[in-house]
Amino acid sequence: MRAIAELSHASDLAWFAAGVLSCAVAMRVAVVSVQTAVARAAPGVVAAAGGEPEVGSEPSAPDAGTPGLGGGPSRVAPGASLRIPLVVTAGPERSTVIVNGAVVGQSPYLGEVSCKSGETVTVELVPERGLPMVRHRRCSPGTLRIAQ
């Protein structure tokens, strides 16, 4: 009778260990997926668990045929609606990022902005302390980068 109870307890422990292991594997897959997505969207931006930034490295050029990612000379009609990646690495960390008057997050920031080709996109960085920075960029295909 005691042997059956011990086997039942061992079985319960084995099921618990299997559940913990499954959760660990699922978490690792999720972290790798997010890191891969960030690396594809903005090669110079560091994922939260990714380590040190790539100082001085140039991002790889995307395919020339990919619209909105700017691999080659892309012809877009003036006034055409675009949705382009926005990467903000300028200013102190945790500065408030404001795009065309709307608060979108804190720096470093990785996101997208919708604009019309040729119009001016205004990006403001408001640090917790110090003077705000304002950058104006023309909306065109490719990644909009705001760096030091």
Image (cartoon, grey):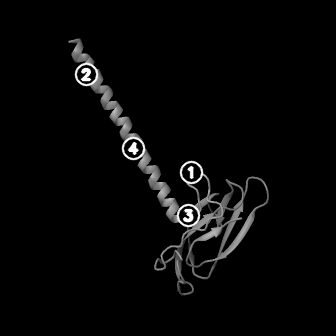
Which one is closest to the eye, mark 4 or mark 2? 4
Q: Label 4 vs label 1: CA separation?
A: 19 Å
Q: Are marks 3 and 2 in contact (CB under 8 Å)?
A: no
Q: SS class of the residue under badge 4?
A: helix
Circle nearer the N terminus (3, 4): 4
Q: Which residue position is annotated with label 1?
A: 48
The image shows residue 136 at horizontal and vertical percentages of 69, 74
The image shows residue 130 at horizontal and vertical percentages of 79, 56
The image shows residue 62 at horizontal and vertical percentages of 50, 73
Q: Label 3 vs label 2: CA separation?
A: 51 Å
Q: Label 4 vs label 2: CA separation?
A: 26 Å
Residue drawn at the location 53% of the way across and 81% of the way down? 72
Which one is closest to the eye, mark 3 or mark 2? 3
Q: Label 1 vs label 2: CA separation?
A: 42 Å
Q: Which residue position is annotated with label 3?
A: 43
Quarter holding the C terminus is bottom right
Dot 1, how many residues are within 10 Å of its Cα: few (below 14), some (14-19), or many (20+)?
A: few
Circle nearer the N terminus (4, 1): 4
Residue drawn at the location 73% of the way across and 56% of the way down? 127
Circle nearer the N terminus (3, 2): 2
Q: Are marks 3 and 4 in contact (CB under 8 Å)?
A: no
Q: Are marks 1 and 3 in contact (CB under 8 Å)?
A: no
Q: Label 1 vs label 3: CA separation?
A: 13 Å
Circle nearer the N terminus (1, 3): 3
Mark 3: amino acid: Pro
Q: SS class of the residue under badge 2?
A: helix
Q: Which residue position is annotated with label 2?
A: 8
